[in-house]
Amino acid sequence: MKRTRISLRLILLLSLPYFASAEPPCPAPSSVRGRDVLALVEELAGPACEGRMIGSAGGLLAARKLEGLLRTAGFGIEFQEFPERIGVLRGTARLEILLPGGAAEAFEYRRDFRETVRGGWVGGSAEGPLQILRSAREDFPRGSVLLVPAALYDPENLDGYAARGAAGVILELPEGSPAQRTGYTGSPPGRLVEPREGPVVLAVSESAFRILETAARRGAAARIASPVRFEDVTGRNLIAVWNGDGGSFKPRLVLMAHYDHMGTDLDGRTFAGALDNASGVALVVRLAEALAGRNLPADFAVVLTDGEEINLSGSWTLANRPPFPLRGAAVLNLDMVGSGSDLPVTVFFNGDPPSRGLADSTAAALASAGFRPSLQPFVHNLDHAHLPRAGARAVSVCEYDTAVYHTKGDLPNLLSESELSALGEAFLRLALEELSTF
């Protein structure tokens, strides 16, 4: 497979001591209005952006739109590129049971079952007798399609099933639903997943799993197919800088959000990703415009990361190849904010004392705006997580809505204009406090 090369322009960029704005700033609002945030969410979550999958034309379109807004506000812009390997949907999705006597029953994709990309198992088709697994080490006939209950779910066990000749594996989902599409490959940070041939792997709902168990006891077989294929793509972090003092660039504040999402499904419909994370991106951009409108003599940056849905790969790249000094900077990452549902607003951090201080300040700003935030330490699966080892103080603010997470129901009409306004004003006050600290 062809690997992406980092451009010469990017290498030159990373060697610069500071960034300068390419254009003089245009007038921008000095406050954050929820209706302006929602207008940008609707663009990012619209059909033209095709679900903003990393490496896709829709993802690039979203990045260029965001680049234009930030450049117009007066920021200097560059892109930081990195390679990634993702699971794409290129084949057929099928789950059927074949009962003794010739009767067959089909299950519905995204209602009863879904693909899985974790582990790098390449899709395809398989057929074999259904076999209920009661332990990971239990023997089974070669060519079986295994039914693995949630209590036994462990991605590491799939290697053993493959070595013992399983034709397919059907996992009972331990959480979530088949309506969700996931991008996490399970590969360590900074390492591309290695595609593997072996059993066809699907995941099913609890109710579908019970039906399959009953069919297995009757001696049924299964015919299954997964659409997963793997493809090399280029991720692009958008780096926007405000060099307020005109000297070497060392930001006191970095506003961050990931702009990628889950792309397009087999039926051609998009995973719009309004809450996850067009909301965070739009709020960060409107905050940046409001700060730029004040013509502050302080250095700050905006980083819109790509590849968060795969493996936090954009933020990992930022931490390992920082385009500007991160040590001492306050990093405020917004991921799923402004939900119209009655959800808690949580401030996540790694647990390191500097980040705890920023978490306390963030919670205080939210409380002053009428929210009742909670603090959650030792969380490492959000984009803030890689930044403390680069010397930054870093937190993520999130309203995790399990009802629509990674489904095609994550649409702009579920967001609250008034809540986005209140969040915008709270974060604007927090940003100004950070930027006024010498």
Image: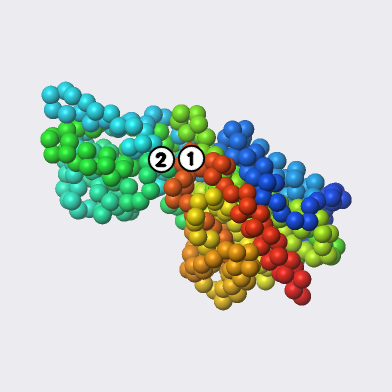
Q: In percent of the image, x 31 and y 54: which residue is there?
A: 154
Q: Image quadrant for the C terminus? A: bottom right
Q: Nearer the viewer, mark 1 or mark 2?
A: 1
Q: Nearer the viewer, residue 340 or 99?
A: 340
N-term-proximal mark, 1 vs 2? 2
Q: For numbered disc 1, what is the local secondary structure?
A: loop
Q: Which mark is residue 285?
A: none
Residue underneath mark 2: 179
Q: Nearer the viewer, residue 373 or 438?
A: 373
Residue located 70% across and 41% down the image? 65
Residue 73, position as x, y percentages in the image: 79, 50
Name which residue type carries label 2: Ala
Classed neighbour count for the residue bearing mark 2: other residues with Cα under 10 Å, few (<14), some (14–19), many (≥20): some
From the top left corner, tell me how far across and down residue 18 is, in percent: 79, 60
Q: Nearer the viewer, residue 113 or 85?
A: 113
- Who's the residue at 60% across and 46% down the image? 278
Local packing at callout 1 (Cα closer than 10 Å; few below 14, some 14-19, many 20+) is: some
Q: Residue furthest top?
A: 102
Residue 374 in the image: x percent, y percent?
A: 51, 67
Left or right placement of residue 263 versus residue 229 in this view: right
Q: Amino acid at mark 1?
A: Gly
Nearest the viewer among 377 and 17 is 377
268 left or right of 150?
right
Look at the image and tell me whether residue 363 can be seen: yes
The picture places residue 161, in percent across and down from the top left corner, at 26, 46
- Horizontal relation, residue 304 to residue 140: left or right: right
Marks 1,2: beta carbons within 8 A: yes
Where is mark 1, residue-wise? 409
Q: Secondary structure at mark 2?
A: loop
